[in-house]
Amino acid sequence: MRFGQSLLKTWLPPVIVPVIQRLRRNCIRFEGSYENWEDALADCTGYDAESILANVLKASLKVKRGEAVYERDSVLFDSIEYAWPVTAGLMLAAALNYGRLDVIDFGGALGSSYFQNRVFLDELTQIRWSVIEQSHYVRAGREHIADENLRFYETSEQCLLENQPNAVLFSSVLQYLPEPRLVVDSFAKLGVDYLIIDRTPFLVNEEASLIKMQRVPSSIYAASYPCWFFNMTDFIQSIEKLGYKKIVKFNSLDKLSNLASWQGLIFKRTNNK
């Protein structure tokens, strides 16, 4: 049986609601082991399915209209689960820029992290939140979600014509890119002050990075897609070679597999005063 959010609130005691939500997340499975991204992709349905966007848009609109408090991966929550290190990293970037935050949210769906942190962002002198996403997300975001602070772009080139970011946020996205380090490298070359990474799987054992299939249950949205599991040491060293210093490592909200630990990292450009 699939419980809707309204049914959860109506029929279950409040203490049970987050348990059901955690069970939903725990139904996510990781299968196989692939030599390369192309082989994994051939076995998957992909993450550009319109059904995924439909669920995310429905949930995001409820948050925007004030009918729900918080959305993550199309799942609605009764209270905001803050990723406090991410919030702190964003506020640090703003503090060192006279209260102005210009952030690129790469792969940020329909602005989930923006709405998650909005109570703090609203206190800043200036906020520009730019989501870079797939074209169908951008169309939906521009039509239904965008506001005076939140904008959507299909490419970094389009975004950079209008913005000068002092932070880039990668939240639950790098593991779903065929060449994640090339993406990080492209933003590092811009001289962005802070790289904020969250909800990213790192192998518990210090083995080489590997690719698996992530299978999402129909209770969230039926889909499967390739997913990187990174080696932490190699990952950090690759970014530090780009001229950044790791200032903090932290545990993320996700706990999806015993094979990996979902963690976050914040990097500061080494010549940033």
Image: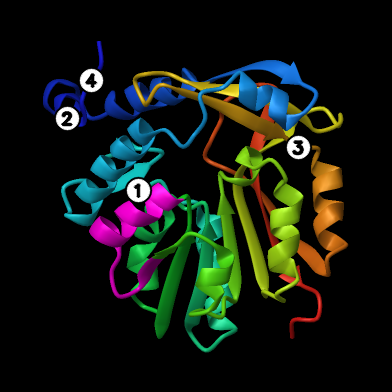
Q: Is residue 146 magenta?
A: yes
Against 172, is 217 above or below? Answer: above
- Image quadrant where residue 95 sits: bottom right
Kindly indicate whether the residue at mark 2 contacts the one at mark 1 (C-beta within 8 angstroms).
Answer: no
Q: Secondary structure at mark 2?
A: helix
Badge 4 density bin: few <14, some 14–19, many ≥20, Cα 10 Å = few
Which is nearer the N-term, disc 4 or disc 3?
Answer: 4
Place of residue 229 in the rendered image (x, y in percent of width and height, measured from the top left) = 72, 32
Q: Amino acid at mark 3?
A: Phe
Between marks 3 and 1 in the image, the one whose residue lies nearer the viewer? 3
Instruction: Please state if 13 lies on the left or on the right of 134 as rendered.
Output: left
Badge 3 density bin: few <14, some 14–19, many ≥20, Cα 10 Å = many
Which is nearer the N-term, disc 2 or disc 3?
Answer: 2
Image point (41%, 33%), residue name:
49
Q: Amino acid at mark 4?
A: Phe
Q: Is residue 227 magenta?
A: no
Residue identifier under label 2: 9
Instruction: Please state if 15 lies on the left or on the right of 138 as rendered.
Output: left
- Image quadrant where residue 245 sits: bottom right
Which disc, if any, is residue 80? 1
Image point (33%, 22%), residue name:
20
Against 105, is 249 above or below? Answer: above
Q: CA distance from mark 4 to mark 3?
A: 34 Å
Kindly indicate whether the residue at mark 4 contacts the one at mark 2 (C-beta within 8 angstroms).
Answer: no
Which is nearer the N-term, disc 3 or disc 1?
Answer: 1
Residue identifier under label 3: 230
